[in-house]
Amino acid sequence: MIFSSKFIEDAVQEFSRLPGIGKKTALRMVLHLLKMEKNEVDGFTTAISKMRHGIQFCSVCHNVSDGDKCDICANPGRNRSQVCVVENIRDVIAIESTQQYSGLYHVLGGILSPLDGIGPEQLNITTLQQRVREEGVTELIMALSPTIEGDTTVYYIAKQLAGSEVNITTIARGIAFGGELEYADEMTLARSIAKRLPIENYVTVHSK
């Protein structure tokens, strides 16, 4: 792709570094920015810069936050006895979009995958155990993607919490095995949360 402007070439190069964005799509984005008013482009770039430099991670649940605690953890109206365990921030957004869950979250930051070098030490499992011990959590809802890695992570966490009084449940399998949680439609995800199962039932079904 040959450009008549080094400015455009550099901008296309930066946009094409985003996931799922090829050079042609990046060029369309850059040309669209050229049609915008300069103050609108300044607002766009300022918002991106502020986001990247100002974003923090919640000290409680590891969700993205503008301060020490995210809006969900700081909300006194949330059910503090329920904690929904998810793989990443996108899953929090997906579940919140269903408007069917009023508890708190815990973002693991990934799932166990030995082949990729991801073990328990790379995940936020220790802080989850601490929350169960110290925050009066009575139910953990394991809302991990239904994959081999996701199931392994569920089993591992359940084993680490064996002997505690917390009730561990999993979302119902309205989501196909091998699918990603973030791509489930809101209705299916809402039903999966509402019809969650005790982990004992889950283990029995998937061990057959």
Image (spheres, grey):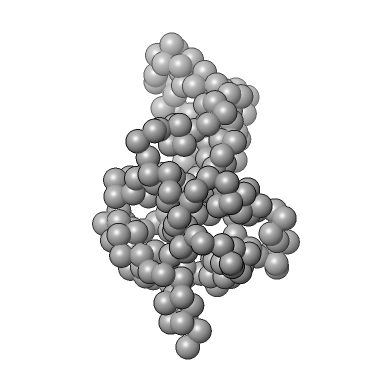
Q: Is residue 113 above or below residue 84?
A: below
Residue at 42 percent of width and 54 percent of height: 182
Residue 14, horizontal then vertical, whole percent: 60, 33
Q: Quadrant of residue 141?
A: bottom left
Q: Is residue 79 above or below residue 86?
A: above
Residue at 59 percent of width and 60 percent of height: 111
Q: Residue furthest bottom?
A: 208
Say left or right for 4 vs 79. right
Q: State whether residue 113 appears in this view.
A: yes
Number of marks present in the image shown: 0
Say left or right for 80 vs 22. left
Say left or right for 206 vs 122. left
Residue at 48 percent of width and 29 percent of height: 30
Residue 131, horizontal then vertical, whole percent: 57, 48
Residue 143, horizontal then vertical, whole percent: 45, 59
Q: Is residue 14 above or below residue 156?
A: above
Along the line of sight, the residue nearer the viewer: 183 or 119: 119
Q: Residue furthest top?
A: 39
Q: Quadrant of residue 185?
A: bottom left
Quarter the N terminus occupies:
top right
Along the line of sight, the residue nearer the viewer: 124 or 158: 158
Q: Quadrant of residue 157?
A: bottom right
Residue at 53 percent of width and 31 percent of height: 69
Residue 107, horizontal then vertical, whole percent: 54, 48
Q: Is residue 185 above or below residue 71?
A: below
Q: State whether residue 27 appears in this view.
A: no
Along the line of sight, the residue nearer the viewer: 71 or 27: 71
